[in-house]
Image (cartoon, rainbow, N blue to C red):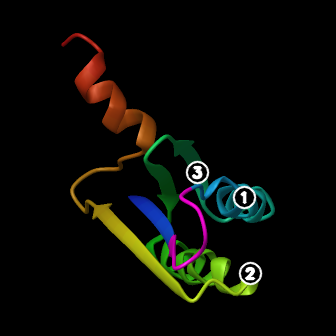
């Protein structure tokens, strides 16, 4: 199991808003069941097997191109541990819950 954070940025379109692209990305995320996700104001947290996260990243990266956006910049950070099981919730709990 791994956790990750992804940000997909469409570049080269008119205007600064990317909300319409993010709506399409969210729908795609909701339509799959291999990777858990939580969208936040600056990106999307992912939880699943590394192979599934990487495959999903390719799918999400392709979405803006479907709208003829000429350039897409995607940032992916992956955190995987082999010494213990870690989830998005356990990572958050480790810094928010008292010892």
Corner quadrant of residue 65: bottom right
Task: Classify mark 3: helix, strand or loop.
Answer: strand
Q: Is residue 16 left or right of residue 5?
A: right
In this figure, which residue is indicated by the disc labeled 1?
Answer: 20
Where does residue 63 sit, x and y in percent of width and height?
68, 78
Q: Nearer the viewer, residue 14 or 65?
A: 14
Where does residue 31 sit, x and y in percent of width and height?
81, 62
Task: Classify mark 1: helix, strand or loop.
Answer: helix
Could you tell me what secondary structure mostly forms the magenta stretch? loop
What's the residue at 43%, 74% (across, down)? 74
Q: Is residue 49 left or right of residue 62?
A: left
In this figure, which residue is indicated by the disc labeled 2?
Answer: 67
Where does residue 50 sit, x and y in percent of width and height?
44, 73
Give the position of the N terminus as an image quadrant.
Answer: bottom left
Marks 2 and 3, how far apart in space? Answer: 23 Å
Q: Is residue 61 left or right of residue 26?
A: left
**Is residue 30 rendered magenta in the image?**
no
In this figure, which residue is indicated by the disc labeled 3?
Answer: 37
Q: Mark 2 vs mark 1: which is more N-terminal?
A: 1
User: Are circles 2 and 1 on residues that touch, CB within 8 Å?
Assistant: yes
Q: Is residue 1 above or below residue 89?
A: below
Numbered range of the magenta stretch: 10-16
Q: Mark 2 vs mark 3: which is more N-terminal?
A: 3
Marks 3 and 1, how far apart in space? Answer: 19 Å
């Amino acid at each position: 199991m791994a956790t990750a954070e992804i940000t997909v940025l469409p570049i080269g379109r008119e205007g600064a808003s990317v909300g319409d692209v993010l709506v399409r990305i969210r729908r795609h995320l909701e339509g799959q069941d291999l990777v858990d996700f939580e969208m936040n104001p600056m990106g999307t947290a992912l939880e699943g097997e590394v192979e599934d996260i990487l495959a999903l990243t390719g799918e999400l990266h392709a979405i803006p191109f479907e709208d003829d956006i000429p350039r897409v910049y995607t940032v992916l950070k992956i955190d995987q541990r082999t010494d213990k099981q870690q989830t998005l919730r356990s990572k958050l709990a480790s810094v928010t819950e008292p010892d």
